[in-house]
């Protein structure tokens, strides 16, 4: 069974992420470990030093543990076999350390979808996302899983994403769509075609290895703004983990769907 | 509940009629079909030869709408009394479809009828040609939307509604407005987006609490709302880009930021900026 690490805060984004993850777990079983990094600078700076600081820090950690436990209980988060971990420190560093120590199969966190893309881009450019070596499930909204899954990306990333996707969730009883993206900002009109990519046979071969077949294989050419209409309505998008300045990042910033980001690391 | 449908003889009114029927059926509302006759003064279109609405004409049209409305319901289960039916022996609950004609300024008469009849919702179709006209006079739907004390649904001609966008900027939402939104989603088989207006900072805790409650409320009805944060300064840009999705629903209350950004006298700016149909919830 796969292991997932979920970073939780006491906010709506985390609440949505928990609900989505619990629904997903019903389709493809995995264990979830909750991790909370309390904001030690909230409201005031830590007082003094030495035992005064330690006492204050312990109180903050204890309060955070109670708050996260309430969130977990409220969302009926029954799937974790471990109590939530509460670890003070710099958020990205704490998460990376936890991922390194226990070799989780994927990481989950929530981020409310925003019309302005700056928070999404900050996330992509964070130390965590630049250094993570496992897939990241970024949950922007609670979406009905019946909406289906779509694997999106430039032609040279599709095979690697498929490998990560099947390695992580091969048990999902959903045939994913494939959208091969050719970003051409100068193109005035969007062009879309089906099953005409040179990659079709490679893609079908990967699916065959897992005894699956794709629902559809489409190729779209256009600017990120034109391609957005293809990435708005799915329960999950599977994408390479891009840099914020890339065109796929610009497209995904406009999508309200949860996204599974696959790292560039090749699988053995 | 009471729905006022302001109708004229144009296609957008005929197209809006089935939506009114379904709304009435789903909410068990009384329906008032209201027509406005001119008060004798020549209409602006006279010089070009366009026909003037006469009393006989609007009466006939409303009569036709009334008959058509009744055909929208299954006679076995319809809650609406048939004209002339006087069966007082049954204990079945009946709702009414009333046809009425008023004379005078269209917007004033529509608002007057809504006030006199204590309506919960005004529904009005409109053309998207040349400034959202109604009865070949400009801005009547906009005036009604601006000045009504109750909720107003402006159904724009030829606009398919795929999504209901609800703009939320405070935590005070009435049960009636929630149900109205649910009705719109059911009526148009549309998705639901909840747009949260922010001033650039994190979302207030009480609004997050309300959003969590809204997600629970709609999820229990198998509706999964999509949450989207929008900064106030980007609102007009956002609204203009959402036209393709179909229906914009806005909570306009005393605490609403929308009242400040789009105060009553600027609702017309909001409606004109947005090509989609609009539901103003009060």
Image (tube, coloured by chain):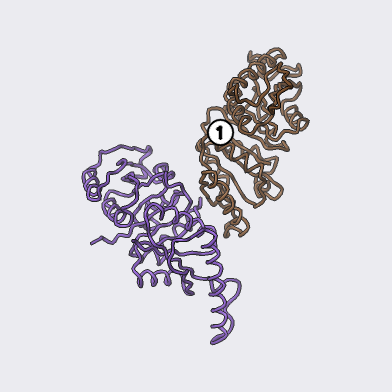
Host chain of mark 1 = B
Image height of B118 relative to B9, above or below: below
Question: Which chain wears purple?
Answer: A
Residue shown at the point (26%, 52%) measured from the top left: A159
Count of marks overlaid on the render: 1
Local crowd size for mark 1, using a 10 Å CA cut-off: few (<14), some (14–19), many (≥20): some
Is residue B172 or residue B131 the one in the foreground?
A: B172
Q: Position of residue B16 (x, y in %)?
A: 59, 26
Colour assignment, chain B: brown
Give the secondary structure at mark 1: helix
Quadrant containing the N terminus of chain A is bottom left
Left or right: B97 as drawn, with respect to B232: right
Image coordinates of residue B139 in percent, x first then y, are 66, 30
- Quick one: which residue is furthest to the front in this view? B89
Residue at image mark 1 = B187
Which quadrant of the figure contains the C terminus of chain A?
bottom left
Give the residue furthest to the bottom.
A50
Residue sitting at x 51%, y 31% = B160
- Give the residue drawn at x 62%, y 37%: B279
Quadrant of the rendered structure where residue B3 is? Answer: top right
Residue B86's spot in the image, x, y percent? Answer: 73, 18
- Is A150 above or below relative to A240? above
Q: Which of the pair B124/A213 is nearer the observer?
A: A213
Of residue A212 and residue B100, the one placed in the foreground of this image is A212
Which x, y percent locates residue B34? 70, 24
Q: Quick one: which residue is furthest to the right in this view?
A: B116
């Amino acid at each position: 069974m796969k292991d997932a690490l979920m970073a939780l805060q006491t906010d709506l984004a985390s609440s949505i992420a928990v609900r989505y993850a619990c629904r997903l777990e019903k389709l493809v079983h995995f264990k979830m470990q909750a991790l909370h990094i309390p904001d030690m600078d909230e409201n005031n700076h830590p007082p003094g030093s030495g035992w005064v600081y330690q006492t204050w820090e312990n109180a903050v950690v204890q309060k955070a543990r109670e708050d996260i436990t309430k969130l977990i209980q409220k969302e009926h988060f029954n799937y974790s076999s471990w109590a939530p971990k509460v670890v003070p420190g710099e958020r990205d560093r704490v998460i990376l350390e936890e991922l390194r120590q226990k070799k989780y199969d994927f990481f989950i966190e929530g981020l409310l979808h925003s019309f302005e893309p700056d928070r999404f881009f900050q996330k992509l450019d964070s130390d965590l996302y630049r250094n993570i070596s496992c897939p990241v499930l970024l949950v922007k909204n609670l979406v009905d899983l019946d909406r289906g899954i779509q694997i999106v990306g430039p032609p040279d990333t599709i095979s690697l994403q498929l490998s990560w996707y099947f390695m992580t969730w091969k048990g999902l009883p959903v045939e994913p769509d494939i959208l091969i993206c050719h970003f051409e900002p100068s193109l005035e009109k969007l062009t879309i075609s089906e099953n005409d990519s040179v990659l079709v046979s490679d893609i079908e071969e990967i699916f065959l290895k897992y005894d699956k077949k794709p629902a559809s294989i489409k190729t779209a050419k256009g600017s990120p703004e034109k391609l957005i209409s293809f990435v708005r309505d799915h329960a999950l998008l599977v994408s390479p983990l891009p840099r914020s300045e890339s065109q796929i990042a610009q497209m995904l910033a406009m999508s309200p769907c949860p996204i599974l980001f696959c790292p560039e690391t090749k699988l053995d | 509940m009471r729905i006022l449908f302001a109708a004229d003889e144009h296609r957008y009114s005929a197209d809006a009629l089935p939506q009114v029927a379904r709304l009435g059926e789903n909410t068990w509302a009384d329906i008032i079909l209201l027509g406005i006759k001119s008060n004798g003064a020549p209409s602006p279109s006279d010089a070009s030869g366009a026909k003037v609405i006469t009393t006989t004409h609007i009466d006939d049209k409303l009569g036709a709408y009334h008959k058509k409305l009744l055909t929208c319901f299954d006679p076995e289960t319809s809650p609406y009394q048939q004209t002339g039916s006087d069966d007082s022996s049954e204990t079945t609950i009946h709702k009414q479809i009333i046809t009425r004609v008023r004379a005078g300024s269209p917007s004033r008469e529509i608002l007057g009828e809504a006030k006199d009849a204590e309506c919960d919702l005004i529904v009005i179709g409109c053309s998207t040609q040349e400034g959202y006209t109604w009865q070949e006079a400009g801005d009547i739907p906009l005036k009604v939307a601006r000045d009504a004390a109750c909720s107003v649904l402006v159904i724009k001609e030829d606009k398919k509604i795929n999504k209901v966008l609800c703009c939320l900027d405070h935590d005070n939402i009435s049960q009636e407005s929630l149900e109205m939104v649910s009705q719109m989603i059911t009526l148009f088989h549309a998705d639901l987006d909840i747009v949260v207006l922010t001033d650039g900072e994190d979302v207030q805790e009480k609004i997050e609490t309300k959003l969590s409650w809204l997600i629970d409320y709609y999820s229990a009805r198998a509706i999964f709302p999509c949450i989207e944060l929008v900064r106030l300064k980007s609102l007009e840009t956002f609204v203009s880009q959402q036209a393709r999705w179909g229906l914009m629903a806005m909570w306009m209350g005393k605490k609403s930021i929308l009242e400040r950004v789009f105060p009553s006298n600027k609702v017309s700016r909001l409606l004109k900026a947005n090509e989609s149909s609009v539901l103003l919830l009060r």
